[in-house]
Image: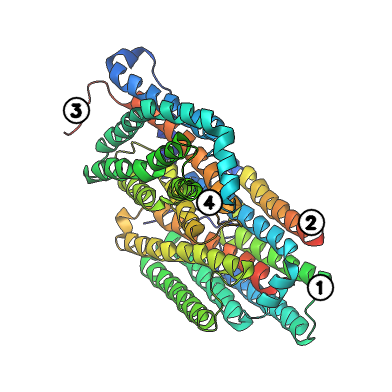
Amino acid sequence: MNRLRSSSGSRVNAIWVLTLVLTLGSVLLASHHNSSGRLTTSTAEAMAVLALAAVKVLCIIWNFMEVRDAPRWLRHWTIGWVGGLWLTIVVVYLY
Amino acid sequence: MTHAQTDTASADQPVTVGAGREKLDLWICWWVLPVFYTFFGLIFVLLAHVMPPPSPELSVSQILAFFHAHGTTIKVGFALLMGVIGLGSISNGLVAYQMKRMSVRPVFAYGYIATLAVGAIPGCLFCAIFFLVAVFRPDRNPHLIALSYDTALLTFVGSLGCFLANYCVFTLAVLLDKNRVFPRWLGYMGVWQIITELLAAPVFIFKKGPFAWNGAIAFYEGTVIFVVFLTCLILQVRKAIGNQPADELVPD
Amino acid sequence: MLQDVAPSPATARAGRLLGDLNVWIFVLGDLVFFGAYFVIFMVYRHQETAVFLASQRHLSLIAGALNTMVLLTSSRFVALAVQAARRGESERARRLISYGGLFGVAFVAIKAFEWAHEIGHGFTLVRNDFFMFYFMLTGVHLFHVLLGLVILVVANRELRSPERCRSWIVESGAAYWHMVDLLWVVIFALLYLVR
């Protein structure tokens, strides 16, 4: 029986826990900013939140969607999508 | 070969040119597709200035100015549309005919024709007629001209219900079809179309922003996605005709 | 029985797709289109930052976070279901897909409560540009979730008869569901978290 690299129950569970932790982390970041009371943007916090989101998205793509084991074109394409989108979002945010 | 690989593989079979004479009727009908949509693009984009649409925020005097500036090309373009609109029916008939070759019952083919026949009225003809009415008598009450403007553009972008139903019918038929007349990915693309129709629903609410009838999302992105889908559909109909045995008996 | 065909070294290098090329055409396109929606959102946010910042505070971080974790959990179940299906454990796979679907239903329920709460407080689609985007983006995403639930039911049914099970349906459904999950992760970050 062939096991794909991404195809193991323990890996799925580990990734799942990681994404939950990253979610909680970004929520804590956001609510901390909330409680400071100021209605301002926070570049550092926004970049952190976006970075954590990127990691979560890559976890889902790489592991749940098994792109780890996918043909090279798909691996490049998905990383390109994440990179291109995040770059655009950051540029617009910082403009 | 897995089932899935066969599916996309069958869509890549070469089109046999030699056998084309027995399917001359189908090829004539196929050519109507690119010809009609070329006319459509020429008319709506270059002549009538409906694509991209002018803003919902124009004042009455600005609307009058728009019709004054483009009156001649609107008349020429939409008069031409009245002449070629019938070609659209042939296009739809051809796709529906291919749908009758599917393993699903012809209900879907009938639904395809019906939804587009109904959809063509608000989705295409209302715009043409109301624009033509607007430029017919330039000295008419300006508010009536502005009403024509709103009616034309709201129906053009907002007539999403018919097309939504059309894409549902098409998608379901392609995905249920065991004869693989069209590849599954074309059916999945129908879901994109359904989504763009849903995103066009707010044009009745917003006069500016991405969900207005000239909005980045409701119009521009929706149009881009539509052009992608239409191109794929036209090419896949061509493949389907090519793959179709010349002596195939299609159920009535 | 769903079986992995033992890949030759060449195939192993070439890689395999979860599902098939058809569903990935859909997924990649959807990712591009949503990417464009996200960029458009950011552009409008840039133009009206104050309004967006103020409005964002009215969103429930708890509901958003809960929804994110619910969807991540449902994805976990679906990923485990695919593995079970590949091993031929159809009954287990069906159970796992059902759990995934249940969490999907939970997402819809939480979203409904959230919307009801916001609308009840006067934050509607027409309140301002932020809420316009909020309802439209989460609405279009919700449509994806509802469609996904139908797809999960189809996948579940497919596993009922292991001998005739078409693996591409189960795997394609999984690929779609994970896409829905990852889109929400981005929506959550942009709408709820990014200040």
Select label 3 or label 2 by which is in front. Answer: 2
Label 4 – label 3 distance at C-alpha: 45 Å
Question: Residue furthest toward the left?
Answer: B252
Tell me the element at label 2.
helix
Residue C167 horizontal side relative to residue B54, left or right: left
Name the image quarter holding residue B24. Answer: top left
Image height of B11 relative to C54, above or below: above
Mark 4–mark 2 Cα distance, whole angstroms, equals: 28 Å
Circle 2/circle 1 CB separation < 8 Å: no
Amino acid carrying label 3: it is Leu
Q: Which residue is mark 3?
A: B249
Mark 3 neighbour class, 10 Å CA radius: few under 14, some 14 to 19, many 20 or more: few
Please provide percent x and percent y for residue C125: 54, 70
Report which residue position mark 2 lands on: A91
Residue C119: x and y in percent read: 51, 79
Query: Which circle, 1 or 4, is nearer the viewer?
Result: 4
Residue, disc 4: B213
In the rendered image, residue C192, in percent from the top left (x then y), is placed at: 65, 74
> Label 1, label 4: how many angstroms apart (C-alpha)?
34 Å
Q: Is residue C88 left or right of residue B108?
A: right
Question: Badge 1 local density, few (<14 within 10 Å), some, or many (20+)?
Answer: some
| Whether labels 1 and 4 share one chain | no
Residue B13 can be seen, yes or no: no
